Image (tube, rainbow, N blue to C red):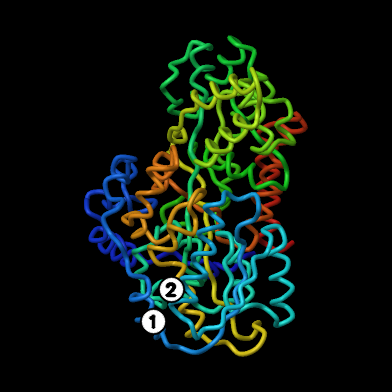
Amino acid sequence: MRPKSVFCKRPPQAVLGGLLASTALFLAGAVFAQESKTGIDPETWTPDYVMSIAGTEDPNTAEECSQITPLDHEGKVSYWFYGTTEAHPQIERDMEKAFFDAFAETYPNIELDAQNINYNDLLNKLRTAALGNAAPTVARLPILWGAEFASKGQLSELKPEDVGYATSDFWPGAMKSVTLNGKTWGVPTNNETMAFIWNASIFEEAGLDPEKAPETWDDVVAYSKQIKDNTGKNGYGLVARVNAGNTPFRFMPMMWGEGGGALDEADPEPTLEAIQINTPGARKAVQNYYDMYVRDKSVPISALTNTQNENQDPFIANELAMVIAHPSEYGAMLDRANAATGSEKEAAMKVVESMRYGKIPRGDARRAVVFGGGNVHLMHPDVVQGDVDRDAALALICFMTGPEWSTKLHWTGSNPGNTRGFKTTAMKERLDTIKFLDVSTSMLPSGIPFPVVAESTEIMNIIIPEMLQNVMTETMTVEEATADAEARIQSLLDGI
């Protein structure tokens, strides 16, 4: 069995201290009232509030980082990250270049060896490098990957205070993702949550209020059926593909909302020992999938192999009414519409005009969304190739996790990990130019990170999707599938 001491709870006094510091951080202290999940009240962290604080602060990154590493420091640092590709918007690529240019100008005597590694290759490449003592000094990884390297002793301890920021400058949910064995192993770089998107014209055609999102998951099931019955179009863009992150990112908000979980990651103080996938709330969420796919047939029949990418064509074709996606989905749909010609372009543009964004529905227990993003880590000297220049590494980490660059580096698809970034002029420009960003940003207080355990990827990408597929193909009943998933998670955690 897993030792009881492996994962510790955050001390209550630390939570209180973080909340008090957060209260002083923003203009309206009421937003940072104590709240069990994030320390921020989701009812007051609204699009209007986010807009009201944007553009009220202009941080001086060089000055702040000079307090950690002198600007004349001579040294070198190696850095691996998953960065932009040709598929990213030009502004993302421009900002990435501007970041490296600004760092080089600020620290002209630090030699930076930065490698942009494909997202799909980075994990295995870093695993191999760490085993061969050839890892970089600094690595920026998706929010959950760091737990594996920390559990193997391949990371050095690293907390926001080490690079000049307060832990309370970062979302408590993000700090959970870098906390293991009571120690902190990284600093959040960016965080995001998705939103609920619907086609107002299909809603109207189906007899639903076109300007009102479904409030609950029960509503989603009912709306999906009504849309299918009244229009013949698919209601909800359900996805259930195995070994694809899209599946847990869209299913877990429902499971958490209804009161379930993989482990107890949704609890205010998770132990990450209790398995909650075979509870009444979890079974209700799985039943929702069964009802939409098998009973009502109101979702794409291809949901067993779909990701959100496969939902984009039917959505722009006015054949799918509801999906969960990032704010960038609006831009993706607009690009598709602009690429069309003739009557198809006119029809696609009408769909874009009909796109609406709202908060992800709540369940019987809560409103929830996956808390995503990335963290930067300092690799342990024992697994790094060559000598480690800690001061140079801290300069780089300070630069990327401050309010300025944690905002600019994640321009279209994410939000600053450093919550001070929400007050910058860059954030105001983002809100002014990225449609619906304010809505998805307002979901951040409802964010829950996946369990911070080394086994999380296997649980989320394999066990949970296979549980859903067992029910959707009627191979197992809901009760059998959740019990099977519980047994598989327990065996995984026990190392069997």
In the displayed structure, does residue 32 sit left or right of residue 192? left
Q: Amino acid at mark 2?
A: Cys
The residue beneath circle 1 is 68
The residue depicted at 69 percent of the width and 42 percent of the height is 465
In the displayed structure, does residue 157 sit left or right of residue 79? left
Q: Quadrant of residue 229?
A: top right
Name the one closer to the observer, 418 or 38.
Answer: 418
- Classify mark 1: residues with Cα within 10 Å, few (<14), some (14-19) or many (20+): some
Secondary structure of the residue carrying tag 2 is helix
Q: Quadrant of the C terminus?
A: bottom right
Name the spot of residue 171 as percent of width and height, x first. Answer: 40, 58
Looking at the rendered structure, which numbered label has been put on residue 398?
2
In the displayed structure, does residue 373 sit left or right of residue 456? left
Name the spot of residue 121 as percent of width and height, x first. Answer: 72, 62
Residues tagged 2 and 1 counted as in contact (Cβ below 8 A): yes
Q: Amino acid at mark 1?
A: Ile
User: Would residue 65 be seen by someone viewing this image from the given angle?
Assistant: yes
Q: Which badge, 2 or 1, comes first in the chain's sequence?
A: 1
